[in-house]
Image (cartoon, grey):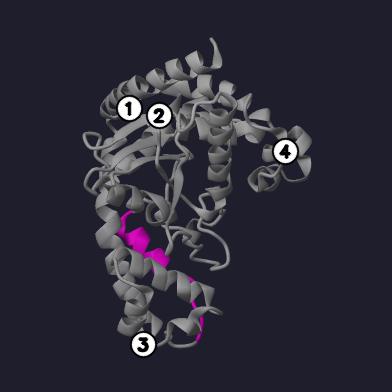
Amino acid sequence: MNKKIFSGVQPTGNLHLGNYIGAIKNFVELQNEKDNECVYCVVDLHAITVKQDPNLLKNNIRETTAAFLASGLDHKKSIIFNQSLVPSHSEVSWILGCTARMGWLNRMTQFKEKAGKDKEKASIGLYIYPILMASDILLYDSTHVPVGEDQKQHLELSRDIAQKFNSDFNCPNFLKVPEPLIQKRFARIMSLKDGTKKMSKSDPSDLSRINLTDKKDEIINKIKKAKTDNSPLPADEKKINERPEVENLLGIYSSLSSQTLQDTINEFGGKNFSDFKKKLSDLVVEKISPISDEINKMKNDNTYIDKILKGGAEKAEKIASKKVKEIKKIVGF
């Protein structure tokens, strides 16, 4: 069965190895599966739920797009665009916001985590952005959405909204109810300095992550300094549960070499970390350096990136505007 896939990435800039292994690598694999129809969006409307520097945001939109393209997403095979170029997303968000219920949004744990104790000072956008996310997905009749565990709740909200809209307006299956595509292994890549924390651009230490724009020497240095422990590498997968940094490094190697964690353990079990880190550095350099070179090259060609985003937006708008007309007719506009 062919899948209609939608996914989006916020243009926060400085994408790293965790973004690549946890999302973008999977996007490329889905794009290259026969008969899949893929829509990949730089979700810049979501980005402004917190205050942004306008010039930095523009640069981050382009850099995220460059990372997509450098990693293997093909604008001829997939639709690649930034959300703000397609007005249908905002328009449908209002209509679906009138279908969604406060109780549903109040259960969203991500808002509670991001707003913290000062939720009264958080923007309305931060509170209601799961409705915009639902609009992103439902506009394209998406059948499947690649999501991490932290976004699974938002996809469930999209499903609830679709089902309620279809029921309220007696239009069965009009809004397709999407299924999650959850990456079972290596979906969360952790910090190189602390294996209990997710790799993040917000970590003050640049040594905690491998950026997709890092040069060869930077990659080697970061892996060399990555935190480990004093025991040899384990010979059994069951023995790494209490060793988060070891599990993380073995997971990175396994994902980039497209093999199971047990295969990697069989390869390196009992060996010392210096040998493993050398092999891991070589592998990360082999996979990430070409991406880094391409991103840095494309960052100097805004015209090329803007042209791809504009072309993708035209394709997206053609699909989305048709759906908006149908939604308006159903609602009674």
| Residue at mark 2 | 82
Q: Secondary structure at mark 3?
A: loop
Residue 328, x across and y down, in percent? 50, 15
Label 4 Cα crowd, 10 Å radius (few <14 / some 14-19 / many 20+): few
Q: Amino acid at mark 4?
A: Gly
Helix or strand or loop: what does disc 1 sit on? helix
Residue range in magenta is 215-230
Question: Could you give the CA–CA distance between mark 1 and mark 2, rounded to whole angstroms?
Answer: 6 Å
Q: Is residue 227 magenta?
A: yes
Q: Do the residues under discs 1 and 2 have CB atoms within 8 angstroms?
A: yes
First of labels 1, 4 by sequence position = 4
Q: Quadrant of residue 326?
A: top left
In the displayed structure, 286 sits above or below 330; it is below
Q: Which residue is mark 3?
A: 271
The answer to which of marks 3 and 4 sits earlier in the sequence is 4
Foreground pick, 72 / 207: 72
Cα–Cα span, label 1 and label 3 = 47 Å
Residue that numbered label 4 is attached to: 103
Q: Amino acid at mark 1?
A: Leu
The nearer-to-camera label among 3 and 4 is: 4
